[in-house]
Image: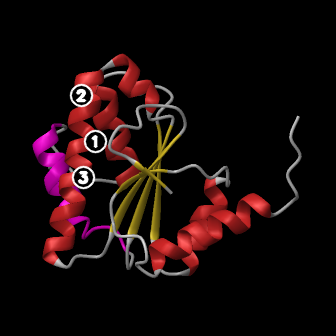
């Protein structure tokens, strides 16, 4: 059994979040390897004027549940059509969410990848394309952090 000193995970997470807040790490889709509690992340990001949006992936096994989880975590407008095209539009906008930047923390993302690999790949690509479009438009930054076990291909760790 490994022993961690109290506060180590939080201070490591704080340093990783600082790299997002100051732009050291460019906006993107990353594997989030920190064990910091989402509430601690939310407090840290909120204190810096950023939005932190938690997406639970435990029950996301198909496209419909994926879109439902996105709608819930991002409080998307009523016009969200629950498809990849309108998800892209929502992600490139996010004007209804306050914040100087946004972090979407998707916990247990691997459940979706395991149950619907084709839709998972499309979702990952839509997130990456939307982040890139936001950068092009000089919109507030968006980071998508994937936490837990799942595919790692093409994903840098943070």
Image position, residue 111 (x, y; %):
45, 25
Circle 3 residues within 10 Å: few <14, some 14–19, many ≥20: many
Badge 2 marks a residue whose secondary structure is: helix
Badge 3 marks a residue whose secondary structure is: helix
Q: Earlier in the sequence, mark 2 or mark 1?
A: 2
Relative to 83, say whether 8 is above or below. below
Q: Quadrant of residue 131?
A: bottom left
**Which residues are drawn in magenta?**
83-98
Circle 1 residues within 10 Å: few <14, some 14–19, many ≥20: some
Is 87 in the magenta? yes
Image position, residue 83 (x, y; %):
15, 37
Q: Earlier in the sequence, mark 2 or mark 3?
A: 2
- The residue pinned by badge 2 equals 119
Determine the CA span between mark 2 and mark 3. Answer: 14 Å
Residue at (21% x, 44% y) in the render: 125
Q: Is residue 63 left or right of residue 52?
A: left
Image position, residue 17 (x, y; %):
54, 69
Is 146 in the magenta? no
- The residue pinned by badge 1 equals 124
Q: Is residue 8 left or right of residue 106?
A: right
Image position, residue 101 (x, y; %):
37, 73
Q: Quadrant of residue 130?
A: bottom left
Relative to 156, say whether 101 is above or below. below
Residue at (38% x, 27% y) in the render: 112
Circle 2 residues within 10 Å: few <14, some 14–19, many ≥20: some
- The residue pinned by badge 3 equals 128
């Amino acid at each position: 059994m490994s022993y961690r000193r109290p506060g180590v995970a939080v201070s490591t997470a704080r340093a990783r979040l600082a790299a997002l807040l100051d732009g050291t790490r460019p906006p993107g889709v990353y594997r989030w390897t920190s064990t910091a509690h989402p509430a601690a992340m939310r407090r840290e990001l909120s204190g810096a004027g950023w939005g932190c949006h938690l997406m639970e992936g435990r029950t996301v096994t198909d496209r419909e549940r994926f879109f439902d989880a996105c709608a819930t975590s991002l409080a998307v407008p009523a016009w969200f059509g629950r498809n990849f095209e309108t998800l892209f539009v929502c992600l490139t906008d996010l004007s209804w969410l306050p914040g100087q930047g946004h972090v979407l923390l998707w916990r247990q993302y691997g459940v979706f990848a395991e149950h619907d690999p084709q839709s998972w790949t499309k979702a990952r690509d839509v997130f990456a394309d939307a982040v890139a479009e936001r950068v092009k438009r000089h919109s507030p930054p968006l980071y998508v952090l994937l936490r837990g076990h799942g595919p790692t291909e093409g994903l840098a760790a943070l």
